[in-house]
């Protein structure tokens, strides 16, 4: 079928669309109108189409199909919210100019808090607690990462318990504990505190004070700890 014949058929099919077309050796390479020509023969792979439908606003489409059967896909308008699936690669510096600029979550006062997988990578600021607070991590999955920061200007009167939910997903690594009720710390008051490396699935940060930061990363099975605990009491594991 010649380009001229295809163009004539398209014009007939889209008469109400005020279609305009630019031909190319591999097929129709550009068009505009109010109806996108999916399933039509004659569009070159990679052809561009501008939907001029005033009600919906102008939208670009690219033919990801073949010359035999067009399959136009909308080009995202990055000025509006977008949902991306699959791996994405961004080159250069990512500059946040709107929306969620700060990767931060405030953990409110409460006896129980569920840490969300969707909030992986975000700093969790733990507010003053009126009781011991249990923070339950999401199911183990490779790549999950969290930081838990104290927001206090003085020691909290209650503890944090950060639990993995299963002894199978036990902690590895450890934290550095600095005793915070002395004017000048000595070697005996700065200690590395580590889990047993076999089934300790809860770390208890007792009476966390200013400067306490606990970080953890999951490899899909275990959670790897690091951080600083400022407190009058040694952190513990169970």
Image (cartoon, rainbow, N blue to C red):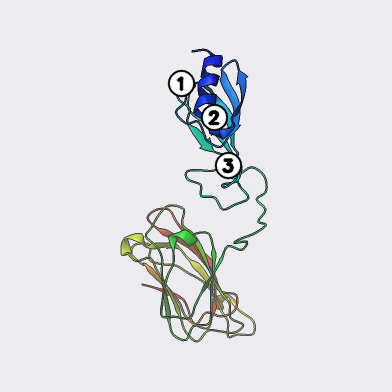
Q: Position of residue 209 (x, y in %)?
A: 56, 80
Q: Is the Cβ of the residue at disc 1 closer than 8 Å to that at disc 2?
A: no
Q: Residues within 10 Å of mark 2 (few under 14, many from 20)?
A: few
**Residue 60 appears left or right of 237:** right
Mark 3–mark 1 distance (CA, rounded to whole Å): 25 Å
Residue, disc 2: 15
Mark 1–mark 2 distance (CA, rounded to whole Å): 21 Å
Residue, disc 1: 68
Residue, disc 3: 53
Query: Looking at this rendering, what residue extends furthest in the top direction?
Result: 2
Q: Position of residue 63 (x, y in %)?
A: 53, 30
Residue at horizontal 53%, vertical 82%?
A: 128
Residue at horizontal 57%, vertical 27%?
A: 47
Foreground tag (3 vs 1): 3
The one of 190 and 228 positioned closer to us in this rendering: 228
Residue at horizontal 47%, vertical 78%?
A: 234
Q: Earlier in the sequence, mark 3 or mark 1?
A: 3
Q: Quadrant of residue 76?
A: top right
Q: Earlier in the sequence, mark 1 or mark 2?
A: 2
Q: Secondary structure at mark 1?
A: loop
**Residue 195 appears left or right of 104:** left
Foreground tag (1 vs 2): 2
Q: Residues within 10 Å of mark 1 (few under 14, many from 20)?
A: some
């Amino acid at each position: 079928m010649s380009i001229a014949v295809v163009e004539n058929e398209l014009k007939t099919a889209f008469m109400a669309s005020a279609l305009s077309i630019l031909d190319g050796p591999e097929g129709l390479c550009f068009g505009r109108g109010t109806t996108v020509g999916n399933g039509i023969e004659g569009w070159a792979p990679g052809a561009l189409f501008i939907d001029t439908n005033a009600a919906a606003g102008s939208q670009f489409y690219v033919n990801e199909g073949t010359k035999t059967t067009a399959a136009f896909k909308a080009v995202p308008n990055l000025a509006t919210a977008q949902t991306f699936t699959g791996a994405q690669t961004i080159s250069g510096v990512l500059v946040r100019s709107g929306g969620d600029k700060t990767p931060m979550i405030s953990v409110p006062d409460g006896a129980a808090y569920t840490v969300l997988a969707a909030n992986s990578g975000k700093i969790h600021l733990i507010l003053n607690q009126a009781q011991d607070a249990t923070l339950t991590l999401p199911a183990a999955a490779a790549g999950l990462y969290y930081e838990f920061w104290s927001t206090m200007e003085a020691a909290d009167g209650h503890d944090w318990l950060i639990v993995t939910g299963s002894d199978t997903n036990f902690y590895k690594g450890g934290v550095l504990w600095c005793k915070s009720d002395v004017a000048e710390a000595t070697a005996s008051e700065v200690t590395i505190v580590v889990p047993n490396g076999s089934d300790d699935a809860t770390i208890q940060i007792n009476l966390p004070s200013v400067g306490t930061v606990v970080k953890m990363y999951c490899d899909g099975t275990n959670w790897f700890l690091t951080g600083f605990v400022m407190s009058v009491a040694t952190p513990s594991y169970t």
